[in-house]
Amino acid sequence: MGVSEKTLLLLFLCVFLGDISLCFSSKLYVVYMGSKDGDEHPDEILRQNHQMLTAIHKGSVEQAKTSHVYSYRHGFKGFAAKLTEAQASEISKMPGVVSVFPNTKRSLHTTHSWDFMGLSDDETMEIPGFSTKNQVNVIIGFIDTGIWPESPSFSDTNMPPVPAGWKGQCQSGEAFNASICNRKIIGAKYYMSGYEAEEENGKTMLYKSARDSSGHGSHTASTAAGRYIANMNYKGLANGGARGGAPMARIAVYKTCWSSGCYDVDLLAAFDDAIRDGVHVISLSLGPDAPQGDYFNDAISVGSFHAVSRGILVVASVGNEGSTGSATNLAPWVITVAASSTDRDFTSDIVLGNGVRLKGESLSLSQMNTSTRIIPASEAYAGYFTPYQSSYCLDSSLNRTKAKGKVLVCLHAGSSSESKMEKSIIVKEAGGVGMILIDEADKGVAIPFVIPAATVGKRIGNKILAYINNTRLPMARILSAKTVLGAQPAPRVAAFSSRGPNSLTPEILKPDIAAPGLNILAAWSPAASTKLNFNILSGTSMACPHITGVVALLKAVHPSWSPSAIKSAIMTTDKHHKPIIVDPEGKRANPFDFGSGFVNPIKVLDPGLIYDAQPADYKAFLCSIGYDEKSLHLITRDNSTCDQTFASPNGLNYPSITVPNLRSTYSVTRTVTNVGKARSIYKAVVFAPMGVNVTVVPRRLAFTKYYQKMNFTVNFKVAAPTEGYVFGSLTWRNKRTWVTSPLVVRVAHSNMGMMV
């Protein structure tokens, strides 16, 4: 069926369904056209874009130009345009088009942490045996909500001139002029066409510029690369010196995210500019909702593929959905980060009338001076609300007469997106003097409540309810929040952190690594409602820039290493040999929770061995998951073939090994490169997953020179039936170095049936 026939069929369906407006109303689409040929001039690409649009607008150049929104012409090819469904269908069949996808919204994955991770507490960040002074030449691009440039975290005091290779710009806009950039913030741009196209119902945009009105972008940038501040705190909590992971690295800002999210066409424009500008690392604390779509219908996967192909590392958050299989940002060329706790908690003591003292999480600095009556919120139900509805402290659900002067016990549903702070406002407006919030998901996130209040999990919540139910006049008092250092066990995987397995390519383990993301203090935008310069936030959004900072240090020490070499160093040097637990149940975490483990920012600089991969390997990976040569050529615009394809995605030289469908026996081959001492010997140490025999051939690797490569094969054999995924590890080990990879295996059901 030809293009015009398909268009006619689509129009017929519109008539048949009685919804002509649906087919003729235009929406914003991304038209993605793969890599840019080396000798193609950006102006020629723009001309081609207009030519394609003119063709679908029946020769009208004016309509073509009106529909055109962005051209992507630096890092890769394509454009964004307003199209009807029929036009999108027509353009998707044109020569050179890889994919056409609608402008989808992505969500933000909303100092002590560096001390906890083992880095020194001053600005030099010097690590014994390594010089990280070269971080002044490392440029990090943050695709986020912008930046608050006046924050002391972004001072350029004592910083040398901007690196010579920088091609970016400082774009003027509302409350932001070009002179605001300095030797720390060396570039700033903003993108809003994709947002404006979708959010037409009068949503106001604060600061049509790179200035940050929400605080998220300032928080992530300062976590990764903020300058040293001697006295950073949140209203007196978490007081102390704080800085980012690479405090002398440069920051380039690409503001694509506005009040309700970040849209694909803007994200791709930011990637396109960042690639041209000369950044070394791109950090994105945002992503799609799970389940994620195909790699080349996803703006972050597309943009990061072209960035990594040019040697730029891309770090992204795994998501905050917290459930099995909810991990996003799944592409193997991206470093995907899960969130953990540190050993610092913010707690508020709850003192019951019987003298029992319980701990809750809180950032509320107000406290009750005396004990008062405590009741379940369900007892204060009002009007048309049922006691059940009132138990969740919904707006207008509380009776003022019943709530006045009391501490209310409210519930928060595990899946709820309702604001916990909002519940404290509702209790206050009903006359309540305190609140205990039982978080059914027990996420451990500290909240700045407006009255004395604390969050507890179900276990402590049940103790409080039992006390109320078994006491004639139950009383309680809630004390002010305080900072607790040395909290154990730590690190724990945060309850909200999204988990594997990888829903798109189960052979690639995601997330890749875990880093602190629970109750993280960093810079903030005083334009946000809190009027604060620093704030405490939780989310994989906060974990991502911790890895970005580590990547910048690695890039400073090893500027010639490929993105995959740096990724390997981060993944294989976990320092925690004791088990990590996962909130809220406290059960033992596994690689679907934390990837390869908890990052060690000192050991990463000397990993001993690395699992390297080149852009050609990612092309072979695409062939292994079903891309044919025609599709591959459209994406890469080179002579790539599928001759060198892998038998399965396991052929990619990844630092973790996942076998999702083990039938009887299976072998995986990997290549390690020696980046340690020239003459070094490593021995294989295997902890086999339960019910699986694992052998490594050879069991000993003897290197004689630096950068020497050696292959080995890991053989898996079913030994006993197991249910679901089982986990183990492979470590290459000598006296001074451990190079560890997770082993993740699921035995195929047909095989298990035979063995019973």
Image (spheres, rainbow, N blue to C red):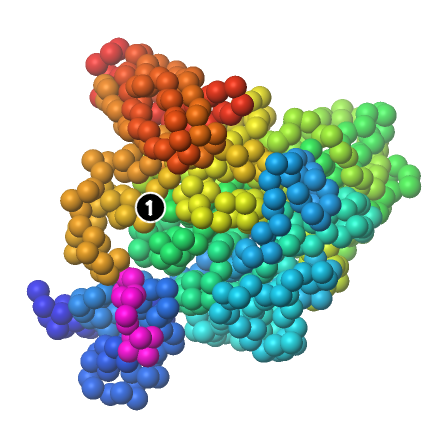
Residue 568, image x and y in percent? 44, 37
Whether residue 528 appears in this view of the structure is no
* Nearer to the camera, 213 or 175: 175
137 to 597, vertically: above or below: below
669 to 102, vertically: above or below: above
- Pick the quarter of the image with the N terminus: bottom left
**What secondary structure characterizes most of the magenta part?**
loop
Residue kind at label 1, given as amino acid type: Gln
Q: Is residue 365 magenta?
A: no
- In this picture, which residue range is highlighted in magenta? 32-46
Local crowd size for mark 1, using a 10 Å CA cut-off: few (<14), some (14–19), many (≥20): some
* Residue shown at the point (70%, 40%) measured from the top left: 120
Asked where in the image residue 348 lies, by quadrant, the reply is top right
* Residue shown at the point (45%, 35%) measured from the top left: 675
384 to 624, vertically: above or below: below
* Nearer to the camera, 308 or 138: 138
Residue 397, image x and y in percent? 67, 51
